[in-house]
Amino acid sequence: MNATVKPTMTIREAHIRESLKSRVEVGIGELALALAVSEMTVRRDLDRMALTGLVRRTHGGAVLAERLAFDLDFAGRRQANRSAKCAIAAEAAKLVKAGDRLILDAGTTTLELACRLREIPDLTVITPSLAVASELQFAERIQTVLLGGVLRRGSSDLTGEVTEAVLEMFAVDMAFQGADGIGLDGTLYTADLRVARVDQKIRTRAARTYVLADSSKIDRTALTCHGRLQNVAGLITDDGITTEHLAALRALGANIMIATPEP
């Protein structure tokens, strides 16, 4: 019996997908001109891509399917300042020892930390992040607890009253959180009120909390204030932080740990 052959993306379909990465919608006529084919051919390509879930058809063309659009957005956020995030995650991993109980929030830097925990034995990792849980699901020496809650549209994290209530069940050694911004007065910011509430609850369940944030987040604000740097165990950032910013945060009494990215 012949093995089933999975359909592969054609060169035209790959071009269509690339066009949609930076566009809300692309039209059939525009694609036909760019690909030097007929509009009928483009319609057939789009119909085939819609059947496989890559795009969603519109009256005059197509848009990226919601899942693909999210994947591309998440991948983009994960790649932003990637070397700094990896260095911060490596520094944070040094704080973790065998047998620890941890909470990791849903940030891209905490996801990098999760990637570095797989070889540390007997860990328990509690998280509201589907991405973190997915990274650790096959780690034999780690018990992973995925919190319940409402999945935020366009994200991979769980929030809401259920998430906050379930967190009350746990007590952990350390929590690791990201931040969308950190003011020079030590204020911690996030862009979503629901995430802020979960982050506040996480800190109450941990003996120590570390904030993981690359230097681009320093002296930046966002919609919601959810804590102060002076009230956590430390901030781990990269060596891109300016001398002025470092001095301002240390003057508050905050513990600032500097991670140096590999060349």
Image: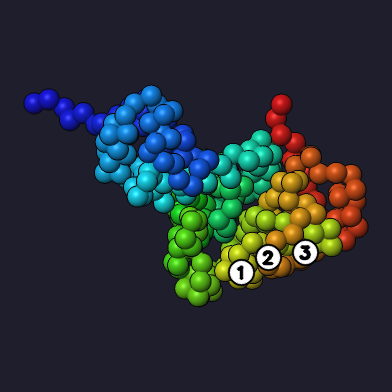
The mark nearer the N terminus, 2 or 1, is 1
Q: In this view, does 151 lie above or below 70?
A: below
Mark 2: amino acid = Leu
Label 3 sits on residue: 187
The x, y position of residue 185, in whole percent, is 84, 62
Q: Is mark 3 on a helix, strand or loop?
A: strand
Q: Is mark 2 on a helix, strand or loop?
A: loop
The residues bearing labels 3 and 1 have C-alpha atoms spaced at a distance of 15 Å
- Taking depth in this image into account, of 117 and 263 the one nearest to the observer is 263
Label 1 sits on residue: 193
The x, y position of residue 109, in whole percent, is 62, 47
Q: Is residue 230 above or below residue 142?
A: below
Q: What element carries label 1?
A: helix
| Residues under numbered marks 3 and 1 in contact, where contact means CB atoms less than 8 Å apart | no
The residues bearing labels 2 and 1 have C-alpha atoms spaced at a distance of 8 Å
Label 2 sits on residue: 223
Task: Judge left or right: residue 109 versus residue 18.
Answer: right
The mark nearer the N terminus, 2 or 3, is 3
State how many labels appear: 3
Give the residue drawn at x 78%, y 52%: 218
The x, y position of residue 83, in whole percent, is 66, 35
Please tell me in which quadrant of the rendered image residue 13 appears: top left
Give the residue drawn at x 80%, y 59%: 183
Mark 3: amino acid = Thr
The residues bearing labels 2 and 3 have C-alpha atoms spaced at a distance of 12 Å
Evaluate whether residue 90 shows in this view.
no
Task: Judge left or right: residue 61 versus residue 130.
Answer: left
| Residues under numbered marks 2 and 1 in contact, where contact means CB atoms less than 8 Å apart | yes
- Taking depth in this image into account, of 141 and 201 the one nearest to the observer is 201
The C terminus sits in image quarter: top right
- Taking depth in this image into account, of 214 and 90 the one nearest to the observer is 214
Task: Judge left or right: residue 223 versus residue 106.
Answer: right
